[in-house]
Amino acid sequence: MEDDAPVIYGLEFQARALTPQTAETDAIRFLVGTQSLKYDNQIHIIDFDDENNIINKNVLLHQVGEIWHISASPADRAVLATCYNHTLDSKVLTCAAVWKMPQESEPGSHESPDDAASAAHSLELLCHLDGTAHGSTACVTWEPTGDGRRVISLADNHLLLWDLQESSSQAVLASSASLEGRGQLKFTSGRWSPHHSCTQVATASDTTVRGWDTRTMSQVYCIENAHGQLVRDVDFNPNKQYYLASCGDDCKVKFWDTRSVTEPVRTLEEHSHWVWSVRYNHSHDQLVLTGSSDSRVTLSNMVSISSEPFGHLVDDDDLSDQEERRPEEKSQEPPQDSVIATYEEHEDSVYAVEWSSADPWLFASLSYDGRLVINRVPRALKYHILL
């Protein structure tokens, strides 16, 4: 049964950290990290059964502190990284660590919500990304197509490249770079590019987006004043190697060609408050998700700057004689970018939006009140893209 209706899951805690289980390409699975000051924090493993339109969940204890960021290994389904608060000598630092989920933590299909306490297992600590020497860690990003052994953490103004060794039980700092200059220089987020043989990372700090070469740890581009206020998130177009999206507190989403950064290629102004999260669809890169403090999720069709601006590219050899005889019917109209849908199931700031790694037409959004919403790309658009 395929239905466009949203499916809503409520955590008992506030939450802002969400990731698809990247290495899982069969089951539709997301990981959510909670933020509770009074209780042990948790990671909820959310499985979506799209045939029956129901959610199954499992809960893992994350006892070290509130989770600010979560990211999953691209190679090992059981491995993830979190950034979490830790109080040391009455000073709060955000630390990062790599964890392994116990094998029995695959969500069961018959578990009721009341089973959560009895079924709660703890995560196994693999290693700390010991960046506390460098300050508080804002995020951890994995090398996208690697074996899950290289990660980058962003701690205050430091970009740290780690090699995970001995089955990820040891993190060795391979190289690092720092933001130079005056003022409060702190990274807010970053993404590792799937292009250029995975040698580039983009970071956001204040109003600037920078690109870094991971081989030399030097800057390869710099988009100063990318946004009028703080940049919250960046993401790479998975199919166009120089294209990057950014979003921020100026309520805008901007699309960049990193070869020419004086002006954005496109700007979206669909939100009325800070935009926290932007994500390209992995398969159909014209589909772009955004989440904002205006409590809304927007799905946009940025077809003009996508890898297939006129639909699927067709070889002349594939055309039948009839098609060749009627060239005037072929539409050469420039494609129109548009907002496909605005989703209003949330009542609080939407801090994260993510596409499923198993189903390209399905996405999740998470708001601070602990509400996770799973939605689908409208069927009419799906068939328009496919057919």
Image (cartoon, rainbow, N blue to C red):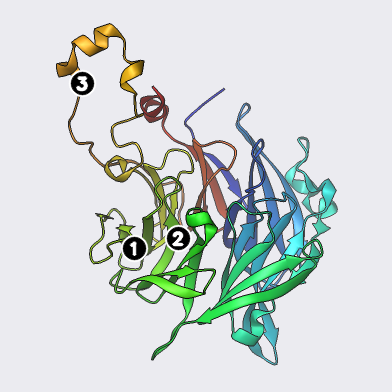
Which secondary structure, mark 1? loop
Which residue is depicted at the point 63% across and 82% down? 93
Q: Front-most of 368 and 81?
A: 81
Q: First in sequence: mark 2 or mark 1?
A: 1
The reply to whether discs 2 and 1 touch (Cβ–Cβ < 8 Å) is yes
Q: Position of residue 47 (x, y in %)?
A: 67, 41
State the residue position of label 3: 330
Q: Front-most of 341 and 235?
A: 235
The reply to whether discs 2 and 3 touch (Cβ–Cβ < 8 Å) is no
Does any portion of residue 64 appear in the rendered image?
no
State the residue position of label 2: 349
State the residue position of label 1: 273
Which secondary structure, mark 2? loop
Q: Tell me how far mark 1 sits from mark 3, CA to CA.
A: 41 Å
- The image quadrant that residue 275 belongs to is bottom left
Q: Is residue 157 above or below residue 8?
A: below
Quadrant that contains the C terminus: top left
Does any portion of residue 283 appear in the rendered image?
yes
Q: Tell me how far mark 2 sits from mark 3, CA to CA.
A: 44 Å
Which residue is depicted at the point 59% across and 84% down? 135
Q: Tell me how far mark 2 sits from mark 1, CA to CA.
A: 9 Å
Tell us which disc is closer to us: 2 or 3: 3
Q: First in sequence: mark 1 or mark 3?
A: 1
The 10 Å Cα crowd at callout 1, few under 14, some 14 to 19, many 20 or more, is some
